[in-house]
Image (spheres, helix red, strand yellow):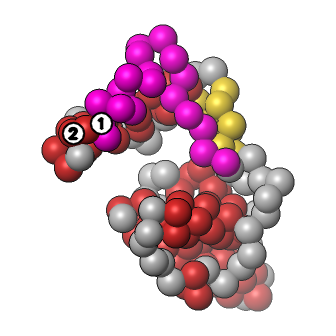
Amino acid sequence: MSCWQDALQAQAELTQQKQIQEKLAQEKIGLTSAGDPGHPQLSRFLDTHNPQVAIATYLHLIIDEADARGHSLDGKLVPLPPDPSLRIPVTTGQLRHELDLLLDDLARRDPERGKQLNALHDSSTIPMEAAVFVAIEGSVEPWESSS
């Protein structure tokens, strides 16, 4: 599952950023950013009150979804508990963009599931929000590649 791998990578990057910030703070340099965060979608989590809890919450949701589908992911890789009250805003344009990517992928891997999902969403509907994301009006995020 690529979302699992991406989210684990984001968790590692957040941990590394925090360690760098703490080290520099100890040296009284004062760092507000640890440079390029690597994965552009990491900004979703960095914009929250507690990025490490936010990514952990997202990873727990992925684990729950994998369990529901009969897959097994190693929850021990996520050291923090989820925050059930966490809500991360995501634009309607971004939700539509991510749904389109999913539909393209399903057209290759599971055409029947793709047809079922596509039947639920025409161009006028707002795609489903995940438990941690809440839709706000807006376009595709600027960090998305134009390809």
Residue 57, x across and y down, in percent: 68, 64
Q: Is residue 36 above or below residue 135?
A: below
x%, y% of residue 18? 66, 77
Residue interval drawn in magenta: 113-131
Please, which residue is most extreme toward the right here?
85
Label 1 Cα crowd, 10 Å radius (few <14 / some 14-19 / many 20+): some
Pointer 1: what residue? 114
Point 57% across, 81% down: residue: 75
**Quarter-wise, where is residue 146 in the image?**
top left
Residue found at x 49% / y 25%: 93
What residue do we see at 31% from left, 40% from top?
A: 113
Residue position marked by numbered label 2 in the rendering: 111
Magenta stretch encompasses residue 87 = no
**Who is closer to the viewer here, 37 or 77?**
77
Of the 4 image quadrants, the one containing the C terminus is: top left
**Other-residue count near label 2 (Cα within 10 Å), few / some / many at <14 / 14–19 / ≥20:** some
Cβ–Cβ under 8 Å for marks 2 and 1: yes
Q: Residue furthest left?
A: 108
| Relative side of 128 to 1, left or right | right
Residue 20 makes an appearance in the image = no
Q: Residue furthest top?
A: 124
Picture coordinates of residue 86 (x, y %)? 77, 53
- Left/right of residue 141 with respect to residue 80 in the rendered view: left
**Residue type, mark 1 in image:** Gly
